[in-house]
Image: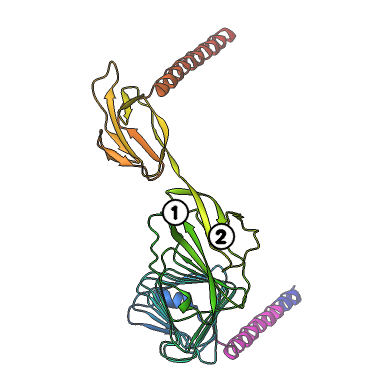
Amino acid sequence: MLGKKSLLICFGLIALVGSIAFVSLSDDAADRSDAAPIDLAAALENAVTGDTVTLPEDTVLSRDAVIRSGVILDDAGFPLRISANITLIVEGTLISSGNLTVIGSVVVASEGMMAIDNEGNTASVSGSLTVQEGGTFSIGSGKISTLSSLGMGRLFIEGTMTVGRGALNSAVNANNTVVTGKLDISEGSTFRIHDVLTIGNAPVLTTELGNSALISGRVILESAAYVLAYGESSFASKNIWYANTSTQFILGGKVYATEYKDQTGKRNIVLPSTSDLRDYILTGWTDSSGKAVTETSDIQIGSTNVYGGVTPRTYRIFSTENESIRWVVNDIEQGSSFEEFGVYGAPYKISIRSAPGYSDLPTIYMNGVQFTPGASFNVAGETSFTTSGGRSAQSDNILIPLLLILVILVLIAFAFFFALKNKGKKAK
C-alpha cells in the first residue's frame, strides 16, 4: 500500500515539475515572439477628436471601421490593406504614403479627406472607392503619386478629386469611373481611362438635362475606352488628350448624352441608360438614316448621331373602397372606388361626395398625406388615395360571415363539452 502511495506521489511531482517547465518555456517563447498585430478597427473606435492613429507595421483591416471627424489615420509608409467585404468610412482624414490596397470599399464622407502621397509606392483599388458630396480625395498634393483602379475596381466621385495639384507627373489608371462632382487634373499629371468614364447621372426628365459635374484638365483614352457624358455637360473634346470623335444621342430635339473616343481607338456605340426617365419611355434608337440601332449594332462612336423615339409614360391612379362616399375624378363620379392610368404631368382633380344614406365625409389622403377635396395635382408617379373612417362593402361582407362562423364553432364546442360531461355521469 505504501509503495503505491509513494508511486502516486512521485508521478504527481513529475507532473508538477513538467507543467512548471512547460509554462516557463511558453513564457520564454512568448517573450521571443513578435508583438500581436495592431487591431486597427479598435484603435479607430477608441480615438477621439485631435488623435492621430499611426500604423506601426503592415496592417490589414479585417472588420468595418470609421475614422471619425477630427481623427487622422496615417499609415506612416506601411502597407494598409482593406479586406474584401470590409468598409472603411473616412469622416476625418486618411493619409497614405505606403502601399494602399482596397479590396473592399473606402467611403470618404462629407467633410472627410483622403490624401495619397505615395512616391515609390502604389494605391490600388480592386473594390470601390467613393467620395461623397462634400468629401475630398487628393492624389499627389505633395509628392508624385499613383493610383490604380483596374479590373473590377470602381471610382465614384460625388465630391472633389484632385490629381497632381502639388506634384506634377502624378498618375491615375482607372477602368471604370463615375464623376458627378468635380475632377481636377493638373497639367503634367495624367488620368488614363481603360474602359469608361461616366460624367453625370442619367436624366430623370427629358425637360431637365443639366449636368453639374465639372472636369478640369484632360483625360487619356486607351484604344477601347470611351467617355459617356449625360445631358448638357461642360465636358467636351478639349478635355481629352489627342484627337477624338463623338456621337450624340438626341431625345426630343435635345442632347440626352454624348459619347467620345480616341480617333485611333475602336469602340462601338454603347446605348445610354434611359430607365430613370419618369416622363417618357424610350421606344427605340435609330441612326441618321432611320435604321434601328441596338446593342448588337456594329457602329463605331463618331460615325453617326443617334435619335431616340419616345412615348409618354403613364402611371396608375387609384383609391381604396369606401361605401360612404363617391369619388369624383375630373368632375366625373366614379363610385366607391376608382382606378385609371394617367399620363405623366397630366392634371387631375379629385373630390368626394356623400353616398346615399351617409352624411359625414371622411378625410382623404394622397400617398399618405392629407389631401384637400377638390384640389388638383399633376401626375408624377403611381398615386393612391385612401380615407379615414368608413368601412368598405368588401370588409363588411367578409366580417359578417366570419362572425357567424365563430358563433357556430362556439356552439359546437359547448355541445361537445356537455355531451362528454353527460357521458361521464352515466359511466359513474
Which residue in the rendered view is the most extreme toward the front?
Answer: 289
Which residue in the rendered view is the most extreme toward the top?
Answer: 426
Is residue 22 rendered magenta in the image?
yes
Residue 53 spot, x, y in % from top left = 42, 83
Tell me the crowding category of disc 1: few under 14, some 14 to 19, or many 20 or more residues within 10 angstroms, Cα based. few
Task: Identify the amino acid type marked 1.
Answer: Gly
Quadrant hosting residue 270 = bottom right
**Figure quadrant of the C terminus:** top right
Q: In this view, does 192 lie above or below 274?
A: below
Task: Identify the amino acid type marked 2.
Answer: Leu
Q: Nearer the viewer, residue 200 or 133?
A: 200
Quadrant hosting residue 217 = bottom left
Q: Is residue 246 above or below residue 423?
A: below
The answer to which of marks 2 and 1 sits earlier in the sequence is: 1
How many numbered marks are there? 2
**Figure quadrant of the N terminus:** bottom right
Residue 128 spot, x, y in % from top left = 52, 71
Is residue 196 rendered magenta in the image?
no
Residue at 48 percent across and 58 percent down: it is: 250
- Tag shown at residue 252: 1
Residue 98 spot, x, y in % from top left = 52, 87
Left/right placement of residue 241 relative to residue 14 reads left
Q: Which of 351 and 411 is in front in this view?
A: 351
SS assignment at label 2: loop
Residue stretch in magenta: 9-35
For marks 2 and 1, give the one nearer the viewer: 1
- Tag shown at residue 220: none
Tell me the crowding category of disc 2: few under 14, some 14 to 19, or many 20 or more residues within 10 angstroms, Cα based. some
Residue beneath disc 2: 271
